[in-house]
Image: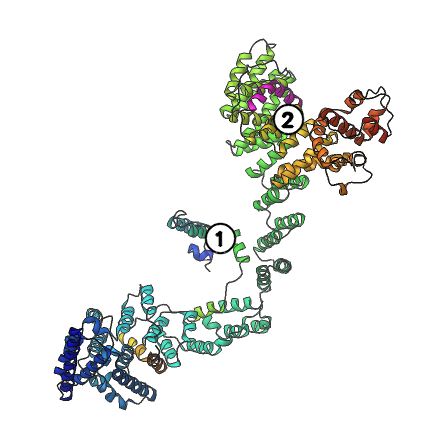
Amino acid sequence: MMTPYQILDVVESANDTDIKQAYLGKVKANPPDSDQQQFRLIHEAYSSIKDHKSRVSYTLFTLPDIDFDLLINKALHTEKNKPITSDLFKQLLNKSVDKSSLLNELGDEEKP
Amino acid sequence: MEEEAESITKNCSLEQQALAKIKSGQYKDAIGLYKQLIKDTDNEPLRMKVSEAIEKTKAFNLFDKYNELFFSDREKQKPLNNEKVETEPSFFKDQLIEIIQSDNDDQLPTLLSQLSTLYLDKQHSRLATVLGLLMLTKYSGDQHYLSQDSIFFQHLNIVQIALKAYQDNNQEKLSEALRSIPFRSAFKDFRVVVSAVLVEETSVEKRLSLLCSIPDKSPYFLLAQLLLVYNKDGAELVNDLFSFNYSQQILIEQIKDFNEHQLEFIAHLLRQYDDLSEKNKFSMAIQYKTLFGFELAEHYCQTRLVNYPAGHKDYIKYFGEINEFEELRIKALSCEQDDNLYDAEYYWRQCIDQLLKREEEGGGLKVALIYRRIADQQQEVAVLIDYLAKSLQYDPDDKDTYLKVLDDYANKEQEIYQRWLNQALDRFPQDVDFLILAMRVANNQNDTTQVNKYAQRLLQIEPQNSEAKQTLFVVHLSQVKKLITEKKYVLAEQQFVDIEELNLAVSYMAQSQLIRDYLIFIQSNLSTGQEDIIKTLKLLYSDPINMQFKASMEALVLGLLETDITIPIDQYSLSSEELSQLIEQIESYTNEGSYQKFLHKALDQIKPILLKSLQQIKDEKLWLNLSQQINLIHHYDLLNGFATLALEKWPQPIWVYYQVQSETKNQAEHCSYINLRRLQQYLELAREENDHRSIVLIDDFLKQYKLAHPGKMTRFFQNLFTDQHQQSSDDPMEQLFGDLSDEILIQLQEPVERLSKQTSLEQIAQLLNHDDNDILLAMMQEPDLFNALIVVKAAEQSGIEINIGIEKVLEYFDVVSNNTPNFL
């Protein structure tokens, strides 16, 4: 689930002005008549972090959304995959030859 | 018949010739003869023989030619259901299975050389597909054993060209090669996979879509899955790694370029993936904290302590002191998530203690926010307000909290409300919201000085504040009227100046002008100015009835007579809109209070024309609104008129209520038994129709009656018209009239109701020709005597024989009759 900071695309240390600017930008890009749900999401995000008090309140009353997958994501994050070269493709092709699946494939043929 | 016989003879001869050709090895000729035969007779044994000939012909590489000669396109795609053909492929397939199982490639050349073109291209496409993958990977050096003229072989060549182009990074040649592989090829899935790989990096969705289109039965499915997982990241990647074997996992990890620490973590994770308990995850978070980031790992472990309290020791060991506040906060929020508000409040209070102990910057705001959080979860308003008050100790400038208390919680407790309002005004003396609230309170309390004070302050801050202007207008106008009645005309003039300075809309100024016109009228001893008053009234209202009502009301308020200003209103009929205006006028004067007497007089002025007009109004809602206002000012005479007229249109409970209410002048104890009975009946009807307003009003009325007549309520008619067995044996009505048949009782109901409504106790006494007050007193003490006499008189007037006379009734109630009643 996205945090209000992520929805508005601002850093957590952003001040009132930055947040308001980001909010107005998002509203401009997502006017209420084009996507009401998205607009509501943006508006709610803004309401929850628009000033110092609301930001303290948000931090205070938000249950940390940290599950183990988040740790795994952090640990195994790769910025960008390498392009799949022909050598890489050949390696994958060779490794994909699996005796049991081939036998299954041939065995299945007998079934009607 | 002759023709058919001739055809059979001819075909038999052709078949014999074809057999002879096969025996002599002349397969080509045999196929020619069979072709002719199939044209005439397409039967199964014949097809078998053709297949046999073809199998033998293929040795001479004549298949393609003869396939073309022999079969139409449809026939080419139709497998030949030939026992011999079926047996041989099964042998090939078994051989291939054996080779794969044993990893013994020695038999492969023999197998490949034995596989016919027909078999590769037409019969067993799945085997061809498997073989295709093997020829690309494991047996890439053995393709020369394959039948060179097979389509399979041609496609294998194309695939190899494609792979070479891929290696040479020759995109154009690669695309061209891929395009050359047709849909019905053993390499069609290979083409899809390579196409997916070639999709732009930015079109990940397209790539994934292509890879996902490979069916799970395809030998290329695993390759597609490997490529899919290669595109994944983090937890998704780990989840998918499970479906691959060890060497495939290793390859993915290598391609992903994971470092040693990451690989160790993956290996650990894969080992424990089936048992990822809170404990295991907690331990791994500590063990790989450098990989996760110290802060994230610490945060994770802190969060998990709620569910894994055994981790405290390790947490302290690896992350140091536990942040008690954070732990309590998470516990409170977890409790809230489980709807356990009781424990949540406990933890929040602990959080407050922690914050107060720590005395950190910004702690006060957190305390205030937590108090407000706790307040939101309270059921009792007093407790809730108490928590909000506490929150203001730490965040005193939170305007929302004051407004919340004033708007939502304290609005029913005048003392608490005033206290909070005063506090708010002390804290925010220039705040428009609080000044408006203060002005309203002062206005409700008729404290004109305070209203003036707050309204003026509001107008200093917001010169165009309409509520302040309107409130001031009402105050000034009321002051003007008071000054006029006190004959302080100069001071009154000053008030008009103040009103003008408010610069309000025309309708307000017309109201002010009207009072000014009256002032001139009064100052001229009612000799001049009447025309000006009427002229101004025309600015306010378009109809003479509203004008007359306004003129009468203002005249009365200013100490004149309601008849001092008269407007011709005969023959005028109010529209619905004009009636609404009149209702608004009545409501407005009612709200000003102390004008009830004036309202009666002003309404009496327009009563006949109002009743006449009302008959043209078809909107019952307007009737009800008007009756409600008239009831509020206790003008029962007018209300009775409305109710009686309304009942002719709408015989509904509410109108019966208003009729009884007006007849009794809101004195439930004076309600006649007949009306009581009507109300009871209509109460039932109101309940059936879910008419809640009538239910409440009638029920309340009946309760008042019950209080005034304990134990006697409704006995008469209840008993008279209810089942015999339900009646009380000592009830006088039961004893006197209990023997009457139901038919007579029903006949009596209407005349009894009518007479009861029309006849008073005094009238009955007079009818009995009693000189003294004995009988009157007896009736006042015993309502059943009156009821019984009414029944007797109603029976007599209606000619219903009941065999009970006045004497018997008087005797029963032990009343001595001096004279025979004159109506008997």
Residue B228: image location, x then y, percent = 35, 71
Q: Secondary structure at mark 2?
A: helix
User: What amino acid is found at the position of numbered circle 1 in the picture?
Assistant: Ile
Q: Nearer the viewer, residue B558 or B386?
A: B558
Q: Which residue is mark 2?
A: B639
Can see residue B554? no
The chain to which mark 2 is attached is B
Decide which of B698, B296 is in the foreground and name it. Answer: B698
Magenta stretch mostly in which secondary structure?
helix
Whether residue B474 sits left or right of residue B219 in the image: it is right
* Chain containing mark 1: A
Image quadrant in which you'd find residue B694: top right
| Residue located beneath label 1 in the image | A49
Decide if residue A86 is in sight here.
yes
Name the residue at the front extreme. Answer: B2
The residues colored magenta run: B593-617
* Quarter holding residue B690: top right
Q: Is there a contact, CB below 8 Å, between mark 2 and mark 1?
A: no
Q: Amino acid at mark 2?
A: Leu
| Quadrant placement of the C terminus of chain B | top right
Residue B372: horizontal and vertical position, in percent? 60, 51
